Amino acid sequence: GQSLEQPSEVTAVEGAIVQINCTYQTSGFYGLSWYQQHDGGAPTFLSYNALDGLEETGRFSSFLSRSDSYGYLLLQELQMKDSASYFCAVRENSGNTPLVFGKGTRLSVIA
Amino acid sequence: DGGITQSPKYLFRKEGQNVTLSCEQNLNHDAMYWYRQDPGQGLRLIYYSQIVNDFQKGDIAEGYSVSREKKESFPLTVTSAQKNPTAFYLCASSDGDRGSGANVLTFGAGSRLTVL
């Protein structure tokens, strides 16, 4: 079967750095993605890793280790608006096939 | 601007009724998807379509039906056979197998269905 594990909740202070981990067990692997969802809103794409290493996009970075079936999302210089749920997602097959999502990590940024 | 439009945003249904949720995209994306989200949960795949006139069941397809007669449209019908239909329904599309394109989903704003 397929499974993605990520912490259910994380709390961090404004201005700090937070790391959200994701481990996966899937039948195939064609990339790890991260999505952000604010309460009542739609998920929005943040980043994608197909190869090992770190991808940086502004205050957000994402890391992948395929040998460890592990990745993380790193958020720097946290702002109150970063309070949201963050989902990791894996594509198991090649082609235009669906993503499998984790249950999400709810990040609360406090002053 | 390109995007995905879902309607209605809120929908109330009596038990035993079928309802259809609309999803329209003007992104010229090949693939479209329907996910269901329950409170505090991740997104679970209902159905997806990679090309017009073709679609596949996802993990929780029972009690749902779809059609893909046009590239732009992928409506979802929640039938009376769905035991617990109250949820937030999200439609998404992706740009096909062009490098990372299939990993980047664009979502609509969602439709919240409540069964009374």
Image (cartoon, rainbow, N blue to C red):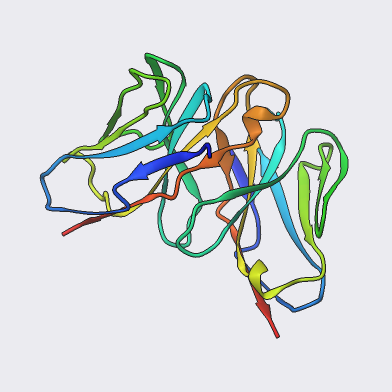
Position of residue A91 in the picture relative to residue B91 (left or right) = right
Position of residue B95 in the picture relative to residue A59 (left or right) = left
For the point 44% across and 50% down, the residue is: B109
**Residue at the limit of the structure toward the bottom, as seen here:** A111
Quadrant in which residue B82 is drawn: top left
Coordinates of residue B45 in the picture (x, y in percent): 45, 38
For the point 53% across and 40% down, the residue is: B1
Coordinates of residue B63 in the picture (x, y in percent): 25, 36
Q: Is any part of residue A14 visible from this angle? A: yes
User: Which quarter of the figure is the C terminus of chain B placed in?
Assistant: bottom left
**Residue at the limit of the structure toward the top, as seen here:** B53
**Residue at the limit of the structure toward the front, as seen here:** B1
- Looking at the rendered structure, the number of numbered marks drawn on it comes to 0
Coordinates of residue A93 in the picture (x, y in percent): 63, 24
For the point 41% across and 25% down, the residue is: B72
Considering only vertical position in the picture, is A45 above or below B73? below
Quadrant in which residue A96 is drawn: top right
